Amino acid sequence: MNKKTWISSTLLVLALVTAGCSSTSGSSTGGDTNSPAASAADGSGEVKKIIVGTGTGFPKVAFLDESGKLTGYDVELVREIDKRLPEYEFELQTMDFSNLLLSLETKKIDFVAHEMEKNPEREQKYLFNKEPYAHWRNKIVVAKDNNAIQSLDDLAGKKVLTSATSAQAQILENYNKDHDKKIEVVYQSGTANDVVSQITSGRVDATLAADFTLSLIDPQGKLKTAGDSLSEADILFVFRKDDADSQKLADAIDGAIKAIKADGTLSKLSKEWLGDDFTQDSTN
């Protein structure tokens, strides 16, 4: 019996007991206040539904497999967290990456699970949980035979592919704010499928990517990373800021992630989907 079935059975018993008491007394006054449905995720026993926003175009992180099933590191982690939080029920909803944060702001989803990097710009607008589930380093990615590009300065005047609202786009936009010679930022829809072809064909000169993603988007090894890391950051889930329910949910998820780390499940998921353990800062 899974957690949802067990909770539903418990609620049915409680409902029958409450109904029996009401019939005996001839009154239902105050019944709604004491029923499990009067509150959610507050210890009353009711399961609160949570809509989790993710994508379908990030290989090994959030994607559709050959059978059309949504899976990947972030997706399977969300499912694992769901198993460990009986007071919540998570429902994954897919959309374009560029729409995830807007959907969070407009309350179409309750949190975002898509390898979201914590950075100062995002912290101003959104709430992040505290326990990271991955740690990555952003690097420049170019064609394998390109030895001319080693830094952001080398990208000035060149075309660089990125996704709108991404942490990598923020790096490029911040560079352009501070320099007269700009990088030509080319925004894509959010899928990784055509990154290799665009770079190898010369339509764009480079992209920025987290260190672990290169092998995922380029299994044939046509690209390479260049230069030093541009930034590194914890990867967390993103919630609505200044929202009590969101804070409560984030705290609950933190507790689950700590347990998933402690029993080795997080490391196992990372190795299975990302090819290595990217669950913590290498300095830890």
Image (cartoon, rainbow, N blue to C red):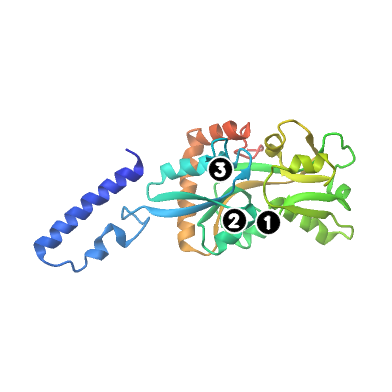
SS for tag 2? helix
Label 2, on which residue?
100
SS for tag 3? helix
> Do the residues bearing badges 2 and 3 touch, measured as CB atoms within 8 Å?
no
Q: CA distance from mark 2 to mark 3?
A: 14 Å
Q: Residue at x 36, y 52 (%)?
A: 47
Q: CA distance from mark 2 to mark 1?
A: 9 Å
Label 3, on which residue?
74
SS for tag 1? loop
Q: Amino acid at mark 1?
A: Thr
| Rendered image: mark on residue 165 | 1
Disc 2 crowd rating (10 Å Cα; few below 14, some 14-19, many 20+) is many
Q: Earlier in the sequence, mark 2 or mark 3?
A: 3
User: For this view, does 228 lie left or right of residue 105?
Assistant: right
Q: Residue at x 84, y 50 (%)?
A: 159
Position in image of residue 208 (x %, y %): 75, 46
Residue 218 or residue 113, whichever sits in front: 218
Position in image of residue 117 (x %, y %): 64, 50
